[in-house]
Each structure stands twice: as structure tokens, then as C-alpha cells.
Image: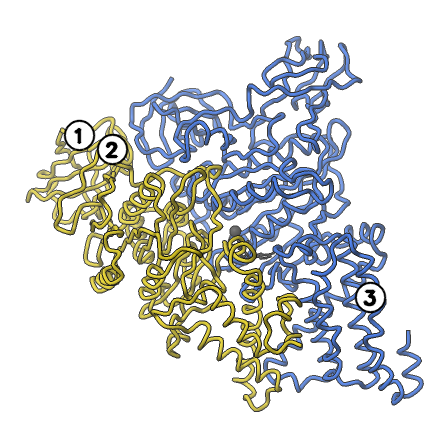
Chain colours: A yellow, B blue
């Protein structure tokens, strides 16, 4: 079948083509369309019956002349050829080279949709990754095999934070990072793509990076393939070649918008804000490809970047993402405006896997308690700050004033740090104690009395 | 034999005469399984439990003659099944790390022999009815599996196998039905998941389910056989709370259904359950636990089914006379699966894309909870606890609001509490329980006659402090009277010393009812002592500096549930902590006030 060209298109509209009289076409199969100008477009079978086959065309159906459109059914899903040679390469969203070098030749071609991992085959991620960033390591730590997105907004330094993580991430006891990086950009600007490329170049890891780029001015529907191609590469590197893979994907919002666009074309029933009801399952198909597998050496750690429309964390894209990922690092405008880098808003940030990867035997025995105490004390301090704004700082009690001083110092010195500053977890924890020592020991009930005696500078 | 006419996502149109709604079908060269959800003349519409990519019109299709059913018998405990009861451990061994499509592995192991002990009261000629216990198999050290006569069977026992080892496919007995047909009996039977299993009659729920979590047991109790929901935005602690319940609750069987959630969360349960001991029996928790997993990346139709698979397994153990708890994480994902299929069927959406029957489906599902008298004359119960994941944390959305009307216990999780890492982040004002009166009976008999009043006093304190906090936020704490400030302080003590209960705290992760009450009584005693002083004129400013306030916040982590005596000893010492101030202010107070205030 894949060598026959059919010229039986009966209608074309809004990116969808209906083909008549092609019996036995496999659902989900790839399609090649040749238009009157000889241009090749690609598509996917989304509905198949003997008398009508519905094809979604990635490059759209503009200017298609039904009489002069030839269609081939390739009889297989989208596949990515994989081999060791993908390292150091740059591909487009569909996995074709965009670095001017020849295509990767391999007999090993994998369905980009992947297959669901059996939950019984998973190994729980427990290895602490030190990113060198206190707000992450100290309070929302990352573990190997985790999916931890950065929730951000327009104009915030999410790219710089992601790049800093890529540069600095390592396991305790490791001299240097042992990661390879899979980088996928969809709907990103050329400037964003260049920023990452240069950052990888500077840190000399370019030959350990695979890039999949679908930029803002490139076909929207290809965006649906880009993360799938990237994750297929990541799975190959992690579970066939035993690499620890760090996947950075940006921007998930562009992906979800592409999905919405296609859903509208298909006439799918919208759930919230026009996004289809299956946005959750679709995102989960991507995010759940992170993880560890029993008896396999490699791992996939995922850091998706997502810009929250109107900075709204309840918008369906961050909301559904947060329901799937193992936490989120939230960047905030307020801190950024005060010049704090990285502007991590710690309270809504969360790492769900932290509880199993820090503390005794992993980082330091006081780590979980210190983190919990920082959250509690800072949350309290923000209340006091709110009160001070109403009644005036002069009216505050001494205790409240100390609390305010703590909040300021915490934001400037703990959250804030240099873009090249790589703090060890011990430095982070010691700094935390230095700041907690600004508060009276009896107010610190999340840490144990022994820890207070050992670390609190003002304790008797 | 029929054939495929059309493939549209998970929906497949088939030319398949004589199928009935709900019937299982096997489709295509991969042998994908699904169920019929629509009929029109000779065509049937089926939804498949697996991804349909690669299927072609013209491929074969066949009806299997039965609805989606589960296998019920020894071998269930400790296992992890997918949404249509495929055993994931065995599937892993057979097909590798990824779940291959079309794998067919029987739900229960066929080769394993179980030691069956027939019921000594039964003999040839005995009258059998559905639910009659035929005998037992010691499935795990803590759980005796009662082999039941399948529901709907009624007749005369012809023979019953003697004590011995049998696989589940071996015949262990024969029964002559009323119409003369002979039915063979096995250690297992099948039951269709969308049909509730029958029982003799419903019974009142009487005993609280003890979860070891103070905010639940002491403040918003749930009964064995009750229905509860845990709504909350992402990260608020729904999963952790359900895992805590699965770990510590005093049910005999726990069914953990991961419906459309994370793979790692099931791995987590699979890894910790065998390590942990049941606080009530001392046996590994895995012996009483069973998992059903359809994670978010697994096919959505099987997600819809997983909830029913879970509840049917729960009912089966209930019918053996056990108290069963089923936690479902998350019922919202189930509702979304329903929505997705409804959308593809072109059914009219009513609210946020959900079909009109969302509410009735939810209600029918929760209706399968309850305490019953079984056909064997025992009592068993199914307690249902569903997590709800409202989009944007908005409780007015359809799934949360429908659920709220159905359940009796509502454990509302708050984002603000979770942000400050106050866990469990159960909101003490938003939550409710309709079971307080029944629970009070149990607490007053088993723990302390003052439970109900102490609980009410603490809740009043919390409500009052919420009001006061509003004032403080407007004008500052200085505007409060001493009495108000002390109320605020005492509420803080209750929150931090009692409600805050980290799952990760080894000492405090589980608190026995005795510990819960001792702690509550202790903190209330501090409150009362302080109030007495305030009434004598002591300023709150001085009271809040008494060291016992900081110390008492640590008691929960210093005393295990076995160590109640030491905790009670601390209560006895509370007046001493206030003594110096009492001396000071009692001497200045009028004699009449003093007499009134003294205990
Ligand atoms: N009872 C608890 N004790 C300690 N930590 C908790 C508790 N509940 C939640 N947490 C923390 O919050 C995180 C998110 O909780 P989780 O139950 O996964 O939220 P949800 O299911 O509502 O999204 C957990 O990973 C854990 O770190
Ligand atoms: Mg959860």
C-alpha cells in the first residue's frame, strides 16, 4: 500500500483531508501528500473507514487542489531512527536533520508515541541531584528520574534557570555532571534556541546534547511531534545506552496551544478555556515518559518549561501539568522585579519526591526539618509583611520586626544567588541555619531540639 | 465473527450482529479487547481498552459473550492489576518494561495450588445459596480467604472436595441447581464489574474507621462502610493522605486504586507496603493490600473501568465478612474518562463538557459503599474514599460539587495550608462529617466519655480564632483583648501541636485513638489554665511566654502511641507550669474570683 498514490480526496478543510475509497488503512498511520506544486506535506490518519479516511495534515490544507493532490499511506506511525550518532545533532520537530548534516541512518526506528511503562517495572527515584541552587536543593529538591517543571511567565528568566540547572546538576560525590541532555524547543523564538545552544557550547557539552527544534514560525502541528521525537531519543539514550538523561522541553504552553488548535479543527468537545478534555491524558503521555526502570542503569529526568498565561497558575496548562508532574518550581514576577535571581517563589513550589531523597543517608539528617521550617517561617513572615503594609511597620512588635528581617534576608541571600554560583547542599543548609538563627529558637518547632542545639546560633 | 468498519480513536465501529450492550469484544489481529457501548442494527460501537493505532477496517472482530468481569479468588492479595484486572507483575515478566498491546495473562495464577479446608458443616445434600462459605484458604498469614459460592447459585451440594491443595481451575465441588443442571464449583468465580454484588441486607455503620490521622479521626470521622471525598488542588496532599489511610487504617483489606495518576506513586506503594507492618496485626501491610493501576499514560477507556474493577474486588472481600477500604485516586480522572468517551459519542455536554449523567454515575458508584449483612450472616463493609482533583482548585466545578452531595465526610484540602507545609492540609473549617454522632458513641465507650465535648471545644476555638485573625489582619494584634489573644494563641497551639501531623514523622505518622485524645485533652487543659489566669487579670503577653507552649507543640513527636502514660503524666504537670503566674495574680484578684477559678 505504501507505494500507491491515491488521488481520491473528497474534501479538504481546516487541516483535515477526507479520502474516499481507500479500504483497509491503518489508524494512526503516517501519510504523505503531494500537492499540485509538487510540495510534500505530511499527515496522520485520525479516523479510518473503508469509504472515508480522515487525514490530519501537519502543514495545513491551504491551497490544496483536490484534483491534483496525491496521497500515499505509509502504513506505519511516525518513527525516529535512533543510534549513538544522535548525540551532538540538531533535528527539526519531526526528527529530520536541521544542522546541515546527513540524516541518521539506522535500522532501529522507533514509534515516537512510545508505549506506556508498566508501573510494576518502575523504580522509585531516590537519588538527590544537587543543582547548586539553594531554593531548589534546600526546599524543593530534584531527584534522578523526576519530572519537575519550571512554571514561569513572559520576561522571567526561566531559560537562564534551566541552563544553570543543566550546567550544575550532579549527584553528591560526583565530580562533574554525568548527564547527556535532550533539548526540545517548540514554538520557541530563534533567540531562545540560540541562548541554549550557546549555553551548551560554553559549557563544552555540545557533543552530549541532542536538540529537537520547532521554532515559532514553523508548522504548528509539527509541535505535537517534537516532544515525542525528543522523548523517544531520550528513552533510547537512557534505557538502551544506560545514560542519565536530562530532558529540557520548552515551552509546554506552545505545545498545549497547538493541541487546542488541532482539537478545534477536529471538532472535539472543549473542556476548559477551549482546551480539549484529553489535554490531561495527552500531557501525561509526555511527562510520564520520565523515570527510572528496574534493572536499567539509565534514567530520564525531565525539566519542562512552561509559561503561565497571565501568570495564572490555575490556567489549564499549568494546572494539568501540576497534576501530573512531581512538583513544580514557580518563578515569580515580584521577586524578579526586586532583582532577586533566581526568582523562585518558594511557597507554591513543590518537589513531591523530595521526601524520599533527602535527609539521613542522602543529604544531611536535618535537611527535611530545615526545609519544613523554612516554609513555615517564611509563610508566617509573609503574613507579618502583609500586616505591616496595613498597620505600618512602626506598630509591629519586636518579634514581628525580627520576622520581617528574616523574610528580607531569606529572599536576598537564600533564594537570591549568582547565575554562576554553585552552592553545595551543605552550604545551602548552613546558610538556612544562619537565617533561621535570626528567629527565636522556641518559635522553630519543625526542627528537633537536638538540631536546634547543634545548629541554631542563638540556642543555649 | 464480524469485522471492523471504522476506527476513531478508542472507538471502533463493528459489523457484529447479536452482541449486547456491555459485551466484551476482541478485535483485530492484535486481539485488542473492549466493550460494546452502542448498538444499531447489525453494527456495534465498542470502546477498546488499548490504543487502536494500527487497526484497519476489515480486520476481524468477535463478541466474547460476557461483560467486563473480574476473577475473584485466592491470589488477589499483594497483587497489582491494571484497569481491566491484568496482573501487571506477570505482564511485566511476560512482555517487558512496556505494556505491549494485546497481552493476555489470566488475572489469577493458574499454576499455584492453594490449601483448601472445606467447611465442616457442609456435606452432600446441604443446601447451598449464593454467598455460602464453602471453605477457606489461608491466603496470607493475616488473611483467611473464604471461598464463596458464587452469587445467584442456589441448589443442593452434591460433593465437596476434601482438605487438600488445589489450583483455582480444579473442581472443588458440584451443585445441583433447581432446574436440574449441575454446576461445578472452583476456588474462584467471575463477576461483572458494573453490577453491584448482592448481599442479604444493608446494615448501619457503627464503628469509626481509625486512620491514625488526628484531623480525620478526631475532627471529621468516617465510619466503616461510609463514603468520603478528599478534594484539593494539586500538591495539597490528596495522594499522601490516601496513602496514609492505606497504611494505617484499621480495615482488614485495603484496595488502592490509582486511576489516571502517576506511575511513581504506585511504585512507591509497591515499595513501602511490604516493608511496613500493620499496626493492628503486626503483619506486613502488603498481605492485606491490593492495587489497581491505570496510570495517566495508560489508555483512557481502561481508566473508566478501573474504578469498577476496584469496587467489585472490594465487595468480594466484604462478602467474606471483612471490613474493606477502597481509596480511589482520583475520581476526577474517572469522570474525565467518561467525558472523553461521551464526547466521542457525540453526546450532549452539559457542564464543562461533562455528560448529563455524571451525577447519577457518581452517585451509583458511591452507593456501592456500605456496611452489609452478608448471605453467610456475617457483617462486612466497604468504605469508599475518593480523591477529587478540581481544575484550578475550584470546588464549584461539576465533579467536586456532585461528589459533595453524595458523600458524608468531606476532607477539604487547602492550598494555603499546603503552601506553608502544614500537613495534612485538611481545612478545619471547610471540612465536614455527617458521622460525628455515631463516632461519638464509639469514642465515649472505647476512649473517653468526654470526646464529643472536647472535640467541640477545640473546633469552637478554631472557629473563634479565624474571626480574630481577620481582625488582626486589619488592625494588628494589639487591638485584641487579653482573652482574645489567648484564644488566638491556644488555637495556634491546637493547629501546630495537634492538627499538624507529618506523614514523614516516624513517631507521629500514626496516632492511636488514645494518643489522639490524650493530646487533645492536654492542649485543651493548657488553654483552660491560661484562660483562668486571663480572667484573673493576667495579660496574654505574659502568658504566651510560658515555656510549656513551645514544649507542648513537640509532644506529639515525642510520644508514640504505646507511650500514652508518659503523655498523660505531662498533662498532670500542666498546672505547675502556670503556678508562678497564678500565685502572682491570684493574690491580687478578689477572693470570690479566686474561688471560682480554682479547680
Ligand atoms: N500528610 C503529609 N505529611 C507530609 N508531607 C505531606 C503530606 N501530605 C502531602 N505532603 C507533601 O506534599 C506533597 C504533595 O502531596 P500529594 O499527596 O502528592 O498531593 P496531591 O495528591 O494532592 O497532588 C507530597 O509529596 C509531600 O511532600
Ligand atoms: Mg495526587
Q: What element does badge 1 sit on?
A: loop
Q: Can you identify the residue that label 2 sits on?
A: A76
Q: What element does badge 2 sit on?
A: loop
Q: Do the residues at pointers 3 and 1 share their chain?
A: no
Q: Is residue A393 above or below residue B266?
A: below
Q: Can you identify the residue that label 3 sits on?
A: B571
Whether the residues at callouts 2 and 3 have beta carbons within 8 Å, the answer is: no
Residue at left offset 24%, top offset 51%: A212
Q: What element does badge 3 sit on?
A: helix
Q: Which is more toward the observer, A333 or B192?
A: A333
Residue at left offset 41%, top offset 75%: A335
**Image position, residue B469 (x, y; %):** 64, 76
**Image position, residue B199 (x, y; %):** 70, 30
Is residue B47 visible in this depiction of the protein?
no
Q: Can you identify the residue that label 1 sits on?
A: A2
Mark 2 C-beta closer than 8 Å to ligand 2: no
Q: Earlier in the sequence, mark 2 or mark 1?
A: 1
Amino acid at each position: 500500500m505504501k507505494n500507491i498514490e491515491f488521488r481520491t480526496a473528497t474534501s479538504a478543510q481546516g487541516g483535515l483531508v477526507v479520502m474516499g475509497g481507500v479500504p483497509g488503512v491503518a489508524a494512526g498511520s503516517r501519510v504523505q501528500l503531494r500537492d499540485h506544486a509538487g510540495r510534500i506535506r505530511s499527515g496522520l490518519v485520525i479516523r479510518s473507514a473503508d469509504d472515508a479516511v480522515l487525514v490530519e495534515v501537519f502543514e495545513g490544507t491551504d491551497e490544496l487542489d483536490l484534483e491534483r493532490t496525491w496521497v500515499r499511506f505509509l502504513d506505519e506511525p511516525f518513527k525516529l531512527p535512533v543510534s549513538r550518532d544522535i548525540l551532538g545533532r540538531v533535528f527539526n520537530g519531526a526528527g529530520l536533520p536541521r544542522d546541515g548534516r546527513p540524516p541518521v541512518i539506522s535500522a532501529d526506528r522507533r514509534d515516537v508515541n512510545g508505549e506506556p511503562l508498566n508501573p510494576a517495572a518502575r523504580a522509585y527515584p531516590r537519588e538527590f541531584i544537587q543543582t547548586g541552587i539553594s531554593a531548589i536543593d534546600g526546599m524543593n529538591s530534584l531527584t534522578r528520574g523526576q519530572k519537575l517543571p519550571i512554571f514561569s511567565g513572559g520576561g522571567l528568566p526561566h531559560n537562564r534557570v534551566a541552563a544553570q540547572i543543566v550546567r550544575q546538576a550532579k549527584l553528591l560525590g560526583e565530580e562533574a555532571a554525568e548527564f547527556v541532555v535532550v533539548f526540545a524547543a517548540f514554538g520557541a523564538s530563534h533567540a531562545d534556541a540560540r541562548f541554549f545552544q550557546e549555553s551548551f557550547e560554553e559549557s563544552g557539552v555540545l557533543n552530549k546534547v541532542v536538540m529537537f527544534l520547532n521554532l515559532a514560525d514553523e508548522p504548528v502541528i509539527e509541535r505535537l511531534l517534537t516532544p515525542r521525537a525528543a522523548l523517544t531519543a531520550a528513552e533510547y539514550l537512557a534505557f538502551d545506552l544506560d545514560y542519565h538523561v536530562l530532558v529540557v522541553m520548552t515551552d509546554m504552553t506552545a505545545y498545549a496551544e497547538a493541541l487546542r488548535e488541532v482539537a478545534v479543527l477536529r471538532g472535539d468537545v472543549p473542556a476548559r478555556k477551549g482546551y480539549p478534555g484529553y489535554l490531561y491524558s495527552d500531557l501525561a503521555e509526555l511527562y510520564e515518559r520520565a523515570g527510572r526502570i528496574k534493572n536499567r542503569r539509565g534514567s530520564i529526568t525531565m525539566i519542562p518549561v512552561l509559561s503561565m498565561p497571565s501568570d495564572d497558575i490555575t490556567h489549564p496548562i499549568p494546572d494539568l501539568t501540576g497534576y501530573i508532574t512531581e512538583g513544580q518550581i514557580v518563578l515569580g514576577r515580584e521577586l524578579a522585579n526586586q532583582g532577586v535571581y533566581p526568582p523562585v517563589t518558594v511557597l507554591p513550589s513543590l518537589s513531591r519526591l523530595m521526601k524520599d531523597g533527602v535527609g539521613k543517608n542522602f543529604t544531611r539528617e536535618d535537611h527535611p526539618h530545615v526545609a519544613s521550617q523554612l516554609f513555615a517561617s517564611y509563610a508566617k513572615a509573609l503574613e507579618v509583611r502583609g500586616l505591616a503594609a496595613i498597620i505600618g511597620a512602626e506598630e509591629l512588635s519586636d518579634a514581628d520586626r525580627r520576622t520581617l528581617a528574616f523574610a528580607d534576608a531569606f529572599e536576598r541571600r537564600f533564594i537570591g544567588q549568582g547565575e554562576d554560583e554553585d552552592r553545595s547542599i551543605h552550604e545551602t543548609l548552613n546558610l538556612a541555619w544562619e537565617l533561621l538563627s535570626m528567629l527565636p529558637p522556641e518559635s522553630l518547632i519543625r526542627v528537633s531540639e537536638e538540631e536546634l542545639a547543634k545548629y541554631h546560633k542563638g540556642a543555649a | 465473527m464480524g469485522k471492523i468498519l471504522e476506527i476513531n480513536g478508542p472507538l471502533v465501529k463493528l459489523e457484529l450482529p447479536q452482541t449486547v450492550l456491555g459485551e466484551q469484544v476482541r478485535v483485530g489481529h492484535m486481539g485488542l479487547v473492549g466493550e460494546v457501548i452502542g448498538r444499531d442494527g447489525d453494527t456495534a460501537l465498542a470502546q477498546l481498552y488499548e490504543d487502536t493505532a494500527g487497526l484497519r477496517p476489515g480486520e476481524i472482530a468477535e463478541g466474547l459473550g460476557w461483560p467486563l468481569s473480574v476473577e475473584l479468588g485466592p491470589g488477589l492479595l499483594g497483587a497489582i492489576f491494571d484497569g481491566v484486572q491484568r496482573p501487571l507483575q506477570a505482564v511485566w515478566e511476560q512482555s517487558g518494561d512496556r505494556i505491549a498491546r494485546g497481552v493476555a495473562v489470566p488475572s489469577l495464577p493458574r499454576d499455584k495450588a492453594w490449601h483448601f479446608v472445606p467447611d465442616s458443616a457442609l456435606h452432600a445434600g446441604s443446601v447451598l445459596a449464593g454467598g455460602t462459605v464453602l471453605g477457606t484458604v489461608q491466603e496470607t498469614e493475616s488473611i483467611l480467604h473464604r471461598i464463596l459460592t458464587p452469587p445467584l447459585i442456589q441448589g443442593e451440594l452434591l460433593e465437596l472436595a476434601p482438605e487438600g491443595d488445589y489450583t483455582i481451575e480444579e473442581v472443588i465441588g458440584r451443585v445441583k441447581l433447581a432446574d436440574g443442571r449441575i454446576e461445578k464449583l472452583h476456588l474462584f468465580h467471575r463477576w461483572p464489574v458494573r453490577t453491584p454484588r448482592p448481599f442479604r441486607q444493608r446494615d448501619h455503620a457503627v464503628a469509626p474507621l481509625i486512620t491514625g490521622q488526628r484531623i480525620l479521626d478526631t475532627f471529621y470521622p468516617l465510619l466503616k462502610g461510609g463514603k468520603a471525598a478528599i478534594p484539593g488542588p494539586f500538591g495539597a496532599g490528596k495522594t499522601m493522605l490516601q496513602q496514609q489511610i492505606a497504611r494505617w487504617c484499621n480495615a482488614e483489606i485495603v484496595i488502592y486504586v490509582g486511576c489516571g495518576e502517576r506511575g511513581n506513586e504506585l511504585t512507591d506503594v509497591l515499595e513501602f507496603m511490604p516493608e511496613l507492618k500493620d499496626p493492628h496485626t503486626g503483619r506486613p501491610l502488603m498481605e492485606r493490600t491490593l492495587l489497581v493501576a491505570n496510570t495517566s499514560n495508560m489508555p483512557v477507556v481502561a481508566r473508566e473501568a478501573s474504578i469498577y474493577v476496584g469496587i467489585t474486588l472490594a465487595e468480594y472481600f466484604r462478602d467474606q465478612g471483612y471490613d474493606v477500604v477502597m481509596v480511589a485516586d482520583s475520581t476526577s480522572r474517572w469522570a474525565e474518562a467518561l467525558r472523553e468517551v461521551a464526547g466521542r459519542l457525540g453526546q450532549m455536554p452539559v457542564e464543562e463538557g461533562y455528560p448529563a449523567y455524571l451525577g447519577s454515575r457518581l452517585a451509583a458508584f458511591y452507593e456501592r459503599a456500605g456496611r452489609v449483612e452478608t448471605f453467610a450472616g456475617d457483617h462486612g463493609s466497604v468504605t469508599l474514599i475518593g480523591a477529587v482533583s478540581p481544575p484550578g482548585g475550584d470546588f464549584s466545578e461539576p465533579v467536586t460539587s456532585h461528589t459533595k452531595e453524595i458523600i458524608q465526610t468531606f476532607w477539604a484540602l487547602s492550598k494555603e495550608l499546603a503552601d506553608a507545609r502544614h500537613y495534612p492540609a485538611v481545612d478545619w473549617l471547610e471540612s465536614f462529617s455527617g458521622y460525628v454522632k455515631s463516632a461519638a458513641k464509639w469514642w465515649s465507650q472505647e476512649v473517653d466519655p468526654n470526646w464529643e465535648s472536647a472535640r467541640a471545644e477545640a473546633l469552637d476555638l478554631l472557629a473563634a480564632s479565624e474571626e480574630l485573625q481577620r481582625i488582626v489582619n486589619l488592625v494588628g494584634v494589639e487591638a485584641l483583648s487579653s482573652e482574645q489573644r489567648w484564644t488566638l494563641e491556644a488555637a495556634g497551639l491546637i493547629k501546630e501541636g495537634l492538627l499538624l501531623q507529618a506523614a514523614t514523622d516516624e513517631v507521629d505518622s500514626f496516632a492511636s485513638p488514645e494518643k489522639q485524645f490524650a493530646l487533645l485533652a492536654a492542649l485543651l487543659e493548657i488553654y483552660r489554665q491560661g484562660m483562668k489566669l486571663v480572667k484573673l487579670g493576667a495579660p496574654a503577653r505574659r502568658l504566651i511566654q510560658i515555656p510549656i507552649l513551645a514544649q507542648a507543640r513537640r509532644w506529639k513527636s515525642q510520644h508514640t502511641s504505646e507511650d500514652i502514660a508518659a503523655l498523660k503524666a505531662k498533662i498532670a504537670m500542666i498546672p505547675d507550669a502556670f503556678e508562678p503566674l497564678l500565685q502572682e495574680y491570684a493574690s491580687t484578684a478578689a477572693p470570690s474570683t479566686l474561688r471560682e477559678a480554682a479547680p
